[in-house]
Amino acid sequence: MDLNLLKLFGTEFDLYNITNIVRGKFWNLNEQSLHDLLVSHISGNSDELLSKMISAENLKSSFMELSKTKFSEIIPSEADDIVMMNEFDRKSDLFLYNSLLREFTNMFKLSTVVSVVRLYDYGIINLSSISYAVENTISSNIVVSKIITSE
Amino acid sequence: MHDEFCRRFKFTNGLLLKIHFKNLKNFLKEKILRKTQSEIESTMGLKTEELIPRRDVTLKTLTSKNVEEVISNLKSCNFGNDIEKAVVLYNDLGEIGVIDTYLDKILYQN
């Protein structure tokens, strides 16, 4: 069993569930609907965190629940809900991208193969962003700030 | 060696399933946005569906007259209930991201 692969998928599942909760909070969904959006998880720690995020008073409090976890770096800075959501989306993309890149320290494992394929996804997303920007004459500075790459 | 092969094959199948769900997402959203059949067909490739094989599922949804018919066709694939919830929630919120969220959930659970 490739433990790195389990760790990688665990991170992706956690990020997926966290994203759904904050999106649900942004859409003002009730707690039952938020629970409906979650994918069942094997980690007890994650379940506790997700429950706290769901019962948080508002979107900002929900983000603050991440402060003592490995996801602290994806907490957006204080702003309007929509600005926080945009920042969160970008930071979570970068978080996952960097997790995939780290797999290259363990060559010849299945987790590395998975990372290569997933990184191709990011390559395609970046190419679409660039094409869209060229088509709509968006300045290159803005495009560079939006593409997903290691900083 | 055999275990390794099976694991890798499952991985490939998972990737194909991901593309299949992307097609379903696009299709459902385009149906909600009342795009025409030819407009929808131009955005989809069915090669993945041939390989999985799930071509019948996609073709059934493609020929559906409206969203309700899409849902009833997808019920036979065990994930119609989740899609129904997604459409109900979409009608309530008017937020098309709900469709993405629910279809991603089905994909992750598979």
Image (cartoon, coloured by chain):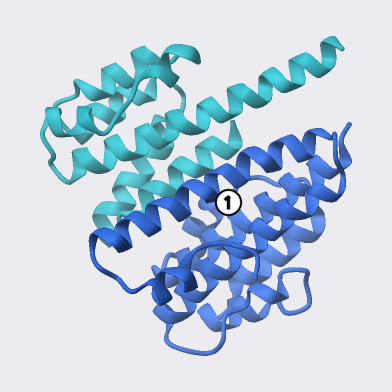
Chain colours: A blue, B cyan
Q: Mark 1 — on which chain does it sit?
A: A
Q: Which residue is mark 1?
A: A38
The residue sitting at 82% across, 18% down in the picture is: B4
Along the viewing direction, whichever of A126 and B7 lies nearer the viewer? A126
- Which residue type carries mark 1? Leu
Quarter of the figure that contains the N terminus of chain A: top right
**Secondary element type, mark 1:** loop
Answer above or below: position of B1 versus A52: above
Q: Is residue A72 left or right of residue B97?
A: right
Which picture quadrant has residue B109?
top right
Indicate the position of residue B38 as horizontal and vertical percent values.
13, 28
The residue sitting at 25% across, 68% down in the picture is: A137
The residue sitting at 67% across, 26% down in the picture is: B11
Answer above or below: position of B60 versus A28: above
Indicate the position of residue A89 as horizontal and vertical percent values.
51, 66
Answer above or below: position of B98 versus B24: below
Quarter of the figure that contains the C terminus of chain A: bottom right
Answer above or below: position of B93 versus A59: above
Q: Is residue A125 left or right of residue A92?
A: left
The residue sitting at 78% across, 55% down in the picture is: A102
Along the viewing direction, whichever of B55 and B96 lies nearer the viewer? B55
Residue B95 in view in this figure: no
Neighbour tally class for label 1: few under 14, some 14-19, many 20 plus, Cα within 10 Å: many
